[in-house]
C-alpha cells in the first residue's frame, strides 16, 4: 500500500491507516446526559473508536470519563498523553487541553485560547477529517454556542459522515441547530437512535461495491472496488443524466473517481451497496437528486485557508497588484468556486490591508461566484459562527468583523467590496479585465481537457500580467504556455503575454454549438461505452428543430438549444444573461418588437424576415416568440425560435440590367414597404408604450400620493401612540416605584417603631392627637379611640408641667425642645419636641418623643463616680510609675556598679601574663566575664521591658545588614566554645539582608534566642542559626534539638515571666523575660516572631520576620583588625569616679594601654586640677556626692582650654532620658556600666582622634 501524502490543509498531519471508523463526539451544556444515552445504546463490540470532546472548566478536575464508563462496557480513558487509537475504546478530552489526532494517535496540547472561546470541537473535527478521511464520523450533541459547525463541514468534504442530535431531543439546542443550519449534516436523530444508525452506516460501507478507478489526487476508498470502469459507465451516465434532468446541473466533465466518491457517500446514507441499486433508489425517491447534488457541490473553505499560501500571496502578489497603475484604478479580483464566501472575504481583507499600507484609495471589486445557490446565500449574509476565531487572527477579527450574539458578521465596508453571483465555469462567460483570479481545489475534480479550457478562459479573463492562485493539489501543467510560476510551491502563477490569436475565452460559451460539443464529448468517451437512448433522442430532435431558447419575463436566458449561439455574441464588460444584450445587433430591433407584441397577448408572434450576413452567406431570419407557462414553472416564460428562410433571388449581372429594371424597382418597393411596416410597428409600439407609461405614471402618482398620505397619517398616529405609550410607561413605572417606596417606607416605619420601642405622639397645631405609638400608652392614658381628642384632656404620668406650652411653641416654629424629665415611677425620659412638617416644609403640628433613659441616667451616675475613682487611681498610678522608674534606675545603677568593678578586675586578670599561662585561671576569668555579661543582659532586659511597656523605648534605626549581625554574634559564640555547637546558614547568593533597624536591639533579639536555645539544649545538641528571605521580608530562624514544648506552653511562651516547665530546663531557670522582649522588639521593628515545636523532646524553632528595605548596593563590613597593646600611647585621660576601687582598676587598665591617667575620686579636686592641666579625654561617673557628673562637666566646659575636650559619661543610669541628659550637660559619649574594656578603649580612641570615627 503506497503511503499517502500529508494533508493539504495541515502539512503537519499524516493520514491514518486504521481500518475502522473513528467517531468524534462533540458536546457542551447538557451533553453528558446525551452522551450517557448514546453509549447505553452502543454495544461494546461495535468495531469503532470514539473520541469525546467537551467544553471543560480548566480550573477543575473532570469526572466525565467515570460518568461515561458507567454507561458502556468499552474501556474509557481520559487522554493526558499520546495514545494509539484502538477499536472498541472511548477516549475523553482532559481539562485545559486541546485534543488532536495524527497518524492513528491522539495527542493533547495545552489550550491557548482565552476562556469563553469554545473551539475545541471544531479543531478536533478538522484534524479528524484530514487524518482519517472517509473513516471519520462526527456527532454533534447538546450544547450552547456553535462549536462543531465548522469542523463537521471538513468531515463531509473529506468523505466522512456527519450526524446531529434532534434539537427537540437536546437539553440545549444551540450546537445541534448551528450544525444543521450549515446544510452539511447527513442525519438528524435523537441521541438514543444514533448508535444503531452508525452501525448500519459502517456495515453498509463495508458492503459497498464500486468500480475501481485510479486517481492519485484522492485518498484510498472506504468500500470495496470490484470490476472495471467500463462496465459501470452506463450506470454512471444514467445517474448523471437523472441528476441533470432533475436539477439542471451537468457533471459529465467531473473525474469519474470524484463522481464515484460522492455517490459512495449517498450509498452509505441510503443503505445501497452498488450503482444499480442506487439508480433505482434515485428514480423512486424524488428528493434524492437534491441530496446527491448537495454532496456533488460540497465546497468547504475557511478564512485564510492554507496560511502559508496566503502569506505568500501577501508577499509576492498584493504589493505589485496595489502599487501598479493609477491611484484611482479599480482592482478586480475573481474568486471562482467561492463556496460560502470565507475565501472571498479573506481576499477583500488582504487587499484592504495592502491599500492601507500603500496609502492608496483604489476601488476594490471582488467577484465571488459559485454554482451552489445555497452556498452563495450563506456568503451573502456575511455571518459566520464563533469558530472562525481559529482561522482569523485577533487583529483582523477586531478590524473586519462585528460580534453578534454567537456569530461574527463581516463589516459593511468589507461586504460592499464583494459581489456574489451564481456562475458555471463550464457554460457561463467569464468576467473580464481581472487582476487576480483565485480558484482553489476545484480543477482537481475535472477532466484534464476541461482543466485546459478553464485555464484558457482564466487567461482570457485576466489583464496582461494578471495573477492566478490555485489550490495546493492543482497546477497549470495542461496550459503551461499561458502561465509562468511566481511561487510554484504555493501555486501562484502569472499570465504570460501571448498574441491576440492565442487568447481565447476557453470553452465554447453561448456562441458555441452544443451539437459540436456533444460530438467532442462523445469522441472523448471511452471505447465500449453503451450510448444513452435518451441522449440519442435529444440529439435527433436537436437536428430537426430550429435553434431556440427560453427566457423569463425580464428577458434573461433560462435555457438554450444547440445552434442558438449563431445569433448571439458576447459584449465587452461584465457578462449578462439578458437576451437583448446578447443577440446580434442586426436582430435586436426585430427581437425587441416581437417580444413586445408577444407580451401583449397569448399567441405566437413572428417578426418580419431580417437579413443576416453578406454575399454568399446572406440569409433571412424570422424570429418567433411564443408565450407559455409550464406546469412545473413558477412564472411566465417566452419561447424564442430563430428560423432561417430562403433569401430572395440574387440580383442579375450588370450586363442584363435593362431587362431587370422592373425587378429592381420591385425589390426596392418591397424593402421600402418593409421599412414602413417596421416604422409603423415601432410608432405603434412607442405610442402604446407611451400611453401605458403615462397611465402607469398617473396611477403610480395617485397611489404614491395615497401612500404618502396614509404613511403620514400612520406616522402621526404612530408618533402619538408612541408618545402616549411612553407617557403611560413612565407613569406606570413611577406609580410602581411609588408603591414600592411606600411599601418600603411602611415596612421601615413598622420595623423602626417595633425595634426602637419609643413613645411617640403626633399632635396638630391645636394639640389634637393625630397618631401615637403603642409605647406612648405607658405614659399617657390613651386608647386608639382617643385619636382627634386634645392632648390636654389626657392624663399622664410625667413630671412635665410645661408640656402644653412647649408643644405650642414648637408648633409655631419658634424652637426645638429637648430636655430630661422625670416620671412618677422614678423613671427618667428624654423628651424631644420637633415640628411636624407636611409637604412644602409647612409646619402642621408637633412630634413628641419620649425616650426612656432611666438606665442611661443610672449609668451616667455610675460613670461619674467611676471617673472620680479613676482620676484618683490614675494619679496614684502615675506616681507609682514614676517611683518604679526611679527604682529601676537606682537599681540598675546599684547593680551595675559592682558588676562594673568585677568586669574591670576581670579584664586586668585576663591581661596578666601569669593568668594567661594558667589554663584554669584563664577559664575562670572567662566565666566571670560571661557571668557579668549575663547579669547585665538580665538587667537591660528588665529595663527594656519596662521601657517598651511604657512606650519610652526609642529605636535608632538605620539600614543594617542582618547577615553581618548574625556573623558577628556567631563569631563570638565560636570563640566562647559552648558545649552545643551553633551552625550559621546564610543565603546561597550571600547578598546582604538589608533591613531598617536598631543594631543594638537586633543583636538583643539574636542573643536572647540563641541563649534560650543554649539553655534548653543538651550538651552536643545541634543549634542552627538560619537566615533567608522572600520577596518582602528577611527571615531569621533559631532551630534547636532541645527539650521542645507542648502546644499549651507554645501559646504562652512569649508572655512576660513565662517559662518552660522546670523539668524541661535542665535545672536552668531564668526570669522569663527574654522571649517576651524578643517579641516586643520584633514588633517595634514592624516584624513578628513565632515559635513551633513538634512536641516535648523534639526541639523548637523560633522564626523572626523583619521587613526588607531597599538601600541600593551595600559595601560588606570589613572585619576589624586585631587589637594590639599600647593603643592609647600618648593619650592623657582625666578620670573621675567616687568609687576608689573602680577608679584604681580603671587607671590600671588605661595605663596598661600606655595612657597617662590623672585619677580623682573627688570631683572638686578634679576640677581644681583641671584648671591648670590639659587632657585629651575626660571620663566621669554621673552619680557622685557633693557634685554629680553633670555639674562637673558643665564646670569643666567653663574652662576655655577644656571647652572642646571630648568627654565620656560612665554610669549605671542607662535610660534614654539619662543619655539625653548626658549629651545636654556636655558629654560626647554615654557608656553604661559595666563597661567592656574594648568598648571603653575604642570610645577613647574615637574621641581622641587615634582612630578615625
Image (tube, rainbow, N blue to C red):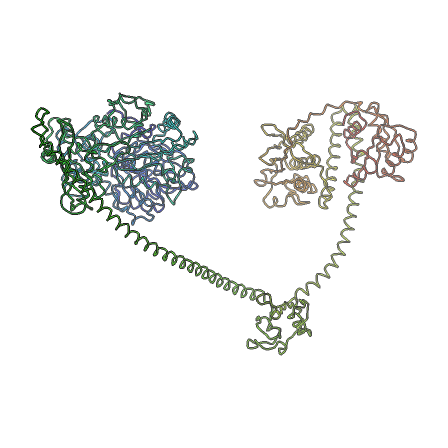
- Location of residue 833 by image quarter: bottom right
Q: Nearer the viewer, residue 411 or 813?
A: 411
Left or right, 562 with reference to 55: left
Q: Residue furthest bottom?
A: 793
Whole-percent x, y for residue 128 in the image: 31, 34
Q: Residue at x 77, y 26 (%)?
A: 1252
Residue 480 visible in this rendered orientation of the protein: no
Figure check: 846 above or below 1156: below
Left or right, 962 with reference to 174: right
| Quadrant of image for the N terminus | top left
Q: Residue furthest left?
A: 659
Figure check: 740 above or below 312: below
Whole-percent x, y for residue 667 in the image: 11, 33
Residue 874 visible in this rendered orientation of the protein: yes
Q: Nearer the viewer, residue 95 or 839?
A: 839
Q: Residue at x 65, y 34 (%)?
A: 995
Left or right, 44 with reference to 890: left
Q: Nearer the viewer, residue 1193 or 725?
A: 725
Left or right, 675 with reference to 866: left
- Location of residue 510 by image quarter: top left
Whole-percent x, y for residue 10 in the image: 33, 30
Q: Nearer the viewer, residue 28 or 406?
A: 406
Whole-percent x, y for residue 595 in the image: 19, 42
Q: Residue furthest front?
A: 658
- Location of residue 80 by image quarter: top left
Amino acid at each position: 500500500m503506497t503511503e499517502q501524502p500529508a494533508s493539504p490543509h495541515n502539512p503537519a498531519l499524516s493520514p491514518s491507516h486504521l481500518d475502522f471508523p473513528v467517531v468524534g463526539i462533540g458536546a457542551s451544556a447538557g451533553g453528558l446526559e446525551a452522551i450517557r444515552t448514546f453509549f447505553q445504546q452502543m454495544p461494546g463490540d461495535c468495531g469503532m473508536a470514539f473520541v469525546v470532546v467537551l467544553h471543560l472548566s480548566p480550573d477543575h478536575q473532570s469526572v466525565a470519563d467515570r460518568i461515561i464508563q458507567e454507561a458502556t462496557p468499552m474501556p474509557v480513558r481520559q487522554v493526558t498523553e499520546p495514545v494509539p487509537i484502538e477499536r472498541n475504546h472511548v477516549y475523553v478530552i482532559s481539562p485545559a487541553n486541546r485534543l488532536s489526532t495524527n497518524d492513528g494517535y491522539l495527542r493533547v496540547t495545552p489550550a491557548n485560547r482565552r476562556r469563553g472561546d469554545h473551539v475545541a470541537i471544531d479543531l478536533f473535527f478538522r484534524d479528524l477529517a484530514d487524518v482519517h478521511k472517509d473513516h471519520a464520523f462526527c456527532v454533534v450533541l447538546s450544547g450552547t454556542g456553535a462549536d462543531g459547525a465548522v469542523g463537521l463541514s471538513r468531515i463531509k468534504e473529506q468523505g466522512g459522515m456527519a450526524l446531529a442530535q434532534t434539537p427537540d431531543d437536546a437539553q440545549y439546542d444551540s450546537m445541534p441547530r448551528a450544525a444543521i443550519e450549515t446544510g452539511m449534516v447527513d442525519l438528524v436523530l435523537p441521541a438514543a437512535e444514533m448508535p444503531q444508525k452508525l452501525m448500519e452506516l459502517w456495515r453498509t460501507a463495508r458492503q459497498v461495491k464500486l468500480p475501481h478507478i485510479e486517481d492519485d489526487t484522492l485518498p484510498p476508498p472506504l468500500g470495496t472496488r470490484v470490476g472495471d470502469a467500463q462496465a459501470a459507465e452506463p450506470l454512471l451516465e444514467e445517474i448523471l443524466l437523472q441528476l441533470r434532468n432533475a436539477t439542471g446541473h451537468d457533471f459529465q466533465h467531473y473525474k469519474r473517481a470524484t463522481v464515484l466518491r460522492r455517490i459512495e457517500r449517498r450509498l452509505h446514507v441510503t443503505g445501497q451497496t452498488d450503482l444499480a441499486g442506487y439508480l433505482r433508489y434515485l428514480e423512486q425517491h424524488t428528493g434524492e437528486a437534491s441530496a446527491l447534488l448537495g454532496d456533488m457541490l460540497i465546497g468547504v473553505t475557511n478564512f485564510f485557508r492554507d496560511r502559508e499560501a496566503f502569506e505568500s500571496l501577501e508577499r509576492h502578489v498584493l504589493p505589485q497588484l496595489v502599487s501598479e497603475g493609477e491611484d484611482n484604478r479599480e482592482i478586480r479580483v475573481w474568486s471562482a468556486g467561492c463556496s460560502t464566501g470565507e475565501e472571498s472575504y479573506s481576499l477583500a481583507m488582504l487587499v484592504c490591508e495592502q491599500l492601507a499600507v500603500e496609502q492608496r484609495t483604489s476601488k476594490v471589486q471582488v467577484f465571488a461566484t459559485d454554482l451552489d445557490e445555497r452556498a452563495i446565500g450563506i456568503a451573502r449574509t456575511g455571518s459566520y459562527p464563533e469558530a472562525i476565531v481559529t482561522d482569523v487572527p485577533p487583529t483582523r477579527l477586531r478590524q473586519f468583523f462585528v460580534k453578534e450574539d454567537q456569530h461574527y458578521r463581516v463589516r459593511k465596508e468589507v461586504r460592499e467590496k464583494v459581489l456574489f453571483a451564481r456562475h458555471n465555469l463550464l457554460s457561463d462567460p467569464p468576467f473580464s479585465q481581472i487582476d487576480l483570479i483565485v480558484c482553489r481545489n476545484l480543477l482537481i475534480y475535472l477532466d484534464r481537457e476541461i482543466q485546459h479550457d478553464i485555464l484558457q478562459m482564466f487567461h482570457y479573463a485576466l489583464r496582461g500580467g494578471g495573477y492566478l492562485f490555485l489550490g495546493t493539489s492543482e497546477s497549470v501543467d495542461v496550459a503551461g504556455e499561458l502561465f509562468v510560476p511566481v511561487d510554484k510551491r504555493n501555486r501562484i502563477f502569472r499570465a504570460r503575454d501571448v498574441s491576440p490569436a492565442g487568447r481565447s475565452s476557453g470553452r465554447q460559451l453561448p456562441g458555441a454549438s452544443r451539437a459540436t460539443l456533444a460530438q467532442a464529448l462523445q469522441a472523448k468517451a471511452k471505447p465500449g461505452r453503451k450510448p444513452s437512448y435518451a441522449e440519442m433522442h435529444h440529439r435527433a430532435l436537436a437536428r430537426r428543430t430550429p435553434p431556440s431558447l427560453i427566457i423569463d419575463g425580464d428577458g434573461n436566458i433560462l435555457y438554450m438549444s444547440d445552434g442558438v449561439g449563431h445569433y448571439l455574441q458576447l459584449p465587452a464588460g461584465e457578462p449578462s444573461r439578458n437576451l437583448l444584450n446578447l443577440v446580434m445587433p442586426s436582430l435586436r430591433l426585430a427581437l425587441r418588437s416581437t417580444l413586445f407584441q408577444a407580451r401583449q397577448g397569448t399567441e405566437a408572434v413572428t417578426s418580419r424576415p431580417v437579413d443576416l450576413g453578406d454575399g454568399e452567406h446572406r440569409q433571412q431570419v424570422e424570429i418567433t416568440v411564443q408565450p407559455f407557462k409550464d406546469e412545473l414553472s413558477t412564472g411566465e416564460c417566452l419561447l424564442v425560435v430563430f428560423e432561417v428562410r430562403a433569401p430572395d433571388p440574387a440580383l442579375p449581372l450588370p450586363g442584363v440590367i435593362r431587362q431587370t429594371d422592373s425587378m429592381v424597382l420591385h425589390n426596392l418597393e418591397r424593402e421600402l414597404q418593409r421599412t414602413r411596416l417596421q416604422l409603423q410597428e415601432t410608432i405603434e409600439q412607442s405610442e402604446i408604450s407611451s400611453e401605458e407609461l403615462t397611465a402607469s405614471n398617473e396611477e403610480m402618482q395617485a397611489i404614491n400620493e395615497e401612500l404618502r398620505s396614509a404613511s403620514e397619517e400612520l406616522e402621526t398616529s404612530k408618533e402619538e401612540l408612541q408618545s402616549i405609550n411612553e407617557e403611560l410607561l413612565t407613569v406606570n413605572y413611577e406609580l410602581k416605584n411609588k408603591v414600592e417606596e411606600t411599601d418600603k417606607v411602611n415596612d421601615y416605619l413598622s420595623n423602626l417603631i417595633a425595634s426602637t420601642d419609643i413613645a411617640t405622639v403626633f399632635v396638630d397645631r391645636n394639640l389634637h392627637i393625630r397618631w401615637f405609638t403603642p409605647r406612648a400608652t405607658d405614659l399617657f392614658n390613651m386608647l386608639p379611640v382617643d385619636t382627634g381628642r386634645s392632648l390636654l384632656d389626657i392624663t399622664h404620668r410625667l413630671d412635665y408641667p410645661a408640656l402644653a406650652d412647649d408643644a405650642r411653641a414648637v408648633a409655631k416654629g419658634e424652637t426645638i425642645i429637648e430636655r430630661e424629665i422625670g416620671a412618677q415611677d422614678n423613671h427618667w425620659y428624654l423628651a424631644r419636641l420637633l415640628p411636624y412638617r407636611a409637604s412644602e416644609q409647612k409646619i402642621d403640628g408637633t412630634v413628641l418623643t419620649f425616650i426612656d433613659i432611666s438606665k442611661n441616667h443610672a449609668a451616667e451616675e455610675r460613670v461619674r463616680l467611676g471617673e472620680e475613682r479613676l482620676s484618683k487611681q490614675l494619679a496614684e498610678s502615675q506616681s507609682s510609675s514614676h517611683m518604679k522608674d526611679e527604682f529601676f534606675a537606682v537599681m540598675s545603677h546599684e547593680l551595675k556598679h559592682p558588676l562594673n568593678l568585677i568586669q574591670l578586675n576581670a579584664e586586668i586578670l585576663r591581661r596578666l601574663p601569669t593568668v594567661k599561662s594558667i589554663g584554669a585561671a584563664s577559664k575562670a576569668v572567662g566565666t566571670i566575664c560571661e557571668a557579668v555579661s549575663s547579669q547585665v543582659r538580665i538587667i537591660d532586659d528588665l529595663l527594656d521591658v519596662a521601657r517598651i511597656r511604657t512606650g519610652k523605648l526609642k529605636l535608632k534605626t538605620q539600614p543594617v545588614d542582618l547577615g553581618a549581625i548574625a556573623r558577628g554574634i556567631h563569631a563570638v559564640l565560636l570563640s566562647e566554645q559552648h558545649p552545643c555547637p551553633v551552625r550559621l546558614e546564610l543565603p546561597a547568593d550571600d547578598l546582604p539582608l538589608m533591613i531598617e533597624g536598631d543594631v543594638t536591639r537586633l543583636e538583643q533579639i539574636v542573643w536572647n534566642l540563641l541563649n534560650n536555645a543554649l539553655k534548653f539544649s543538651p550538651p552536643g545538641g545541634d543549634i542552627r542559626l538560619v537566615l533567608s528571605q522572600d520577596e518582602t521580608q528577611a527571615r531569621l530562624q533559631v532551630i534547636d534539638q532541645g527539650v521542645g514544648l507542648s502546644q499549651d506552653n507554645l501559646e504562652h511562651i512569649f508572655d512576660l515571666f513565662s517559662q518552660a516547665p522546670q523539668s524541661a530546663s535542665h535545672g536552668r531557670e531564668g526570669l522569663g523575660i527574654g522571649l517576651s522582649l524578643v517579641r516586643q522588639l520584633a514588633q517595634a521593628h514592624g516584624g513578628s516572631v513565632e515559635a513551633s515545636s513538634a512536641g516535648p523532646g523534639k526541639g523548637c524553632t523560633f522564626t523572626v520576620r523583619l521587613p526588607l528595605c531597599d538601600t541600593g548596593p551595600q559595601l560588606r563590613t570589613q572585619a576589624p583588625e586585631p587589637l594590639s597593646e599600647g593603643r592609647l600611647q600618648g593619650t592623657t585621660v582625666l578620670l573621675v569616679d567616687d568609687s576608689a576601687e573602680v577608679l584604681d582598676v580603671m587607671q590600671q587598665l588605661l595605663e596598661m594601654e600606655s595612657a597617662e591617667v590623672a585619677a580623682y575620686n573627688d570631683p572638686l579636686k578634679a576640677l581644681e586640677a583641671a584648671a591648670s592641666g590639659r587632657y585629651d579625654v575626660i571620663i566621669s561617673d554621673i552619680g557622685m556626692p557633693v557634685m554629680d557628673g553633670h555639674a562637673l562637666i558643665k564646670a569643666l566646659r567653663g574652662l576655655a582650654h577644656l571647652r572642646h575636650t571630648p568627654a565620656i559619661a560612665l554610669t549605671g543610669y542607662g535610660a534614654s532620658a539619662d543619655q539625653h541628659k548626658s549629651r545636654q550637660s556636655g558629654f560626647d559619649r554615654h557608656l553604661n556600666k559595666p563597661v567592656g574594656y574594648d568598648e571603653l578603649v575604642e570610645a577613647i580612641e574615637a574621641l581622641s582622634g587615634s582612630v578615625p570615627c
